[in-house]
Image (cartoon, grey):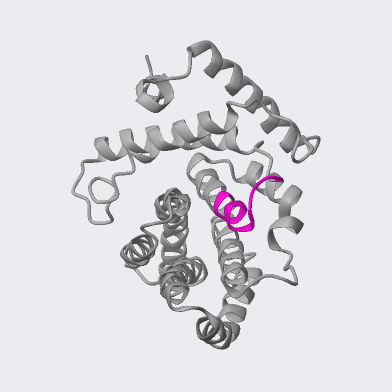
Amino acid sequence: MGPMDDAGESLDAHWAVAVFEPADRRELLTFAEDVRRRILSGSWVADSPVPDQLLPMSGAYELAARERLDLFGIGHPNTSASAEQRAERARVLELGARRAFDLAVAIPLDDTDAHGILYHTVLLGALATVAGRDTEFRGWLSLHRERLFTPAYADDWATTYLRGIVELWTEVLDGSGPSGLDRAMEIVATIRETRPDRERETLESAGESEEMSLRFFFFALHHLTDSATELLLFRLHGEPSDVRQRIFVSVSLAGEATAGDARIHAALDWIYEAAVRIVTRRTPQLDLLAQSSRAH
């Protein structure tokens, strides 16, 4: 039995996954694989009917894998875990993220509210990065981009801000090199330009209880912007060297500020892991550039 077989058994043994009969799991995973291939070929139609258990089983695999993230233990940027422990963790995370992504990518969005769709998008993007499903995620985005990122006249600032951050994260997680990041830089500039006035106006017009909730939400979004910007700068310039620690702190603060919103927490945990994968991909390129510079 190979390492990936062990990872699969570990995930299937988790209580959230084990409630599904093995035959039902196989059937749903087969359906998900067909959808994945159709997304890659461009023949999948968004919001097509799907089995009722698709979303619950995607959530079950996501939860089973997320419990192995252990962001304050082996997944912490300053972990002292051995290489073998880290490799075993990575195998489980990659397989769990792959199954969760494959099952979730077909889920219709037509009955989901604006914030729910955006949370789903950033979670899918992070899962895709960890799972190595970047091409599939681009295909999914092409089906839904207009719905996701086209502003609506009635949008409030909270929705507009969240939409901008989700689009920013989809851009900085896409690929491993410094190219193709113009749109991400444009989004950061737009947020910095519009945020002060729009946020002030929103808070001034809110009631007392709503204002407090909005302040926490905006605090979380500020840190999600900061962490995405840190990753963007690292992809562009290879700096700062402590980018993992900076992103970890920002994402952790965002999580603390949204402690009452269960819908965003899964995305926040996977965002950090996805960011680490991007940093890891970029670092060997920097080493090659440094060696080339020394050679000349």
In this rendering, the count of numbered labels is 0
- Residue at image position (59%, 37%) is 104
User: Measured from the top left, where is residue 256 in percent x and y?
Assistant: 33, 62
**Could you say where residue 134 lies in the image, as x and y percent from the top left?**
60, 46
Q: Residue at x 76, y 58 (%)?
A: 146
Q: Quadrant of the N terminus?
A: top left
Q: Position of residue 168 (x, y in %)?
A: 58, 65
- Is the residue 104 above or below the residue 117 in the image? above
| Quadrant hosting residue 60 | top left
Residue 296 in view of the camera: no
Give the magenta range. Answer: 110-120
Residue furthest out toward the top: 23
**Residue 288 image position (x, y, % from top left):** 45, 59
Q: Is residue 4 above or below residue 247?
A: above
With 79 as the anchor, is 29 left or right in this view?
right
Q: Position of 234 compared to 255: left or right?
A: right
Q: Is 183 included in the stretch rendered in magenta?
A: no
The residue located at (48%, 13%) in the rendering is 21
Question: Which of the pair 262/69 is nearer the observer?
Answer: 262
Residue 115: in magenta span: yes
Q: Quadrant of residue 258?
A: bottom left
User: Of 94 and 258, which appears nearest the observer?
Assistant: 258
The answer to which of 73 and 221 lies nearer the viewer is: 221
Residue 21 in sight here:
yes
Q: Main secondary structure of the magenta part?
A: helix
Residue extending farthest to the left is: 80
Q: Residue at x 47, y 51 (%)?
A: 267
Identify the image quadrant of residue 115: bottom right
Q: Classify 21 as above or below 79.
A: above
